[in-house]
Amino acid sequence: MKLATLDDGSPDGRLIVVSPDATRFLSCDQYATLQSALDDWTAAEQRLRALHERLVCGEGASVPIDRLLAPLPRAWQWLDGSAFRSHGALMEQLFGTAPPPPDRPLMYQGMSHRFLSATEDVVLPRTEDGIDFEGEFGVVTDAVPLGVTPDQALSHIKLIVQINDWSLRVLAGPEMKTGFGWVQAKPACSVAPFAVTPDALGDAWRDGRVCLPLVVDWNGRRFGAPLGDLMGFGFHQLVAHAASTRNLCAGTIIGSGTVSNPDYRVVGSTCIAERRGIEMLDQGSPQTAYMAFGDTVRMEATASDGSVLFGCIEQRVVATTARG
Amino acid sequence: MKLATLDDGSPDGRLIVVSPDATRFLSCDQYATLQSALDDWTAAEQRLRALHERLVCGEGASVPIDRLLAPLPRAWQWLDGSAFRSHGALMEQLFGTAPPPPDRPLMYQGMSHRFLSATEDVVLPRTEDGIDFEGEFGVVTDAVPLGVTPDQALSHIKLIVQINDWSLRVLAGPEMKTGFGWVQAKPACSVAPFAVTPDALGDAWRDGRVCLPLVVDWNGRRFGAPLGDLMGFGFHQLVAHAASTRNLCAGTIIGSGTVSNPDYRVVGSTCIAERRGIEMLDQGSPQTAYMAFGDTVRMEATASDGSVLFGCIEQRVVATTARG
């Protein structure tokens, strides 16, 4: 089942159920927003799946793709992991930080009061901050009690999403050195339009991982297409880590961190910082500059049969002063 | 003007305006929740001040103090600074971290989907995690645009609150070393019942600082009463720091970090970690243990004339397994 959120002028938008081929939609009378559905998921899922069945049978209106927001345009909680070790090891080299203990996922609390749609311009103040994209997968949970095990956590993963975690790299290193984590280095993320239930991924959802390539193009040129399979921790382990000392509210979004594979020289990367790390290793210094205003990035996880999954993120970076 | 939130069974509770002496209240027909008032503050403030005037004239029902929630029982954003340098310097010693650049406030993004009321039990899994309180002041903003100056930021501070930022110290050090900041080490904060407008503090609101002693008692014994005056950065500077690369949503809460004074050996501390830092300096190792289950902590900022300001936080720490 595919869910999306239509821009109706309200902060949380209007929840819709979308046909598997992403062409048609029906809205749900009982649950106006995705957050309200997640707050009451057991009952809501039945209602939404009934609409899904009607969509499969051909009902529904045409999806206005340019009016779709992030599935959750704002969320009460966003926690981002860094679960791909090939990326982590490079970043430690780039930022001079210590490797984490092997048994504990890396995770930070990110801003969640705003998630950008997949197509809106990304407004940032300065290219000098080192503007970078980060291709990720993420999951959305229902309410998760403090102390769940990874096995229990798996059943709390209700939806899967695809994220661009915008990062300001020049600000990131100094913020890491404080030990307090990132505030200025992590402005709002963007999210692909369709949040899908795990069953909709079929065999591509395995062991709490999204086993698909995440294809990233920067200014129209292929930048990377690593597989999501190689997460060092599965999403269920990330959820359990997050819930170790707190209850998680329904609608908590948890990210994988930058998708990365050890053969990054072959498959490429989903963020510029990783390529710069490789260049440091291979050539002694970074060669690739971060993004310029006007640059575009496109991200899409592709199914082996070519079918639409999360939809596509395709955005342009613009300067604050370019705003109307 | 004093605002509070009454528990009506809904997640955000019911906004009320409270008399200056905190004994009587009126509710507002137009704004059901504090978040909805902050979303429309200019208009809302007029309505709420009209109720305040009626309360001053003696109207209103008796405040059911045990039914008050945190003023914002959940918020879209919580950013906590660490603006008292005497505390920061001790923590750097305790955790072996580097001092921050003198021109940049320390700040982390904290969990905001739940703020505990001032009187509810604090449920935590293990005393081995090093349970600690942290007495702070905080401000609540309306919508703040990216790139505001500190001077501009001052006018976006709409309410002032008093916070206990619960911390799990044994988890904090390892999380800081990752550079990702805190997730497990920072469960939900507690907030004193009354959020007050800056004018309600009179002379005690100066240069973006709450110039009042924060009196902390642990298990009924005085632990500290440092002044809020000595913040290294004012709240307006913290707001501007936070808004450097993002818009802040209305209802963003920004914390001062642990209130601390350089003469902490005389005035005491508002968290156990600071006392342990002093003991390390003076005696070579920490002497004071963190909290045990059953312990209580009480925090109240007191006015020179003895009047009620934010009200009082008074809570007990209990084990997860003690829950009903």
Image (tube, coloured by chain):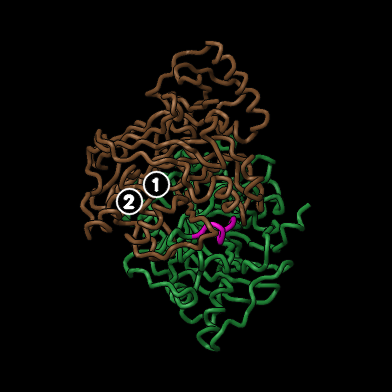
Chain colours: A green, B brown
Q: Which mark is residue A258?
A: none
Which residue is disc 2 drawn over?
A: B274
Outermost residue to the bottom: A283
Q: Magenta region's main secondary structure? A: loop
Which corner quadrant of the image does residue B62 belong to? Answer: top left
The residue positioned 68% from the left and 45% from the top of the image is A7
Label 2, label 1: how far apart the Cα atoms are: 9 Å
Residue A198 visible (yes or no): no
Q: Residue at x 49, y 32 (%)?
A: B12
Instruction: Assess whether residue A240 is covered by the magenta stretch.
Output: no
Q: Which of marks 2 and 1 is nearer the N terminus?
A: 1
Assess whether mark 1 and mark 2 are in contact (beta carbons under 8 angstroms): yes
Segment colored magenta: A182-188
For residue A183: magenta? Answer: yes
Out of B85 and A136, give the one closest to the viewer. B85
For label 1, the crowd category at 10 Å Cα-Cα, with few meaning under 14, some 14 to 19 and many 20 or more, is many
Quick check: B260 above or below B35?
below
Q: Which of B303 and A194 is in front in this view?
A: B303
Residue A81: name its quadrant.
bottom left
Residue A274 in the image, given as x and y percentages of width and height? 53, 75
Amino acid on which the number 1 mark rests in the picture? Ser
State which quarter of the image contains the N terminus of chain B.
top right
User: Which of the labelled discs sits on residue B260, or is there none?
Assistant: 1
Which chain letter matches label 1? B
Q: Position of residue A95 (x, y in %)?
A: 48, 73
Quarter of image, res B135: top left
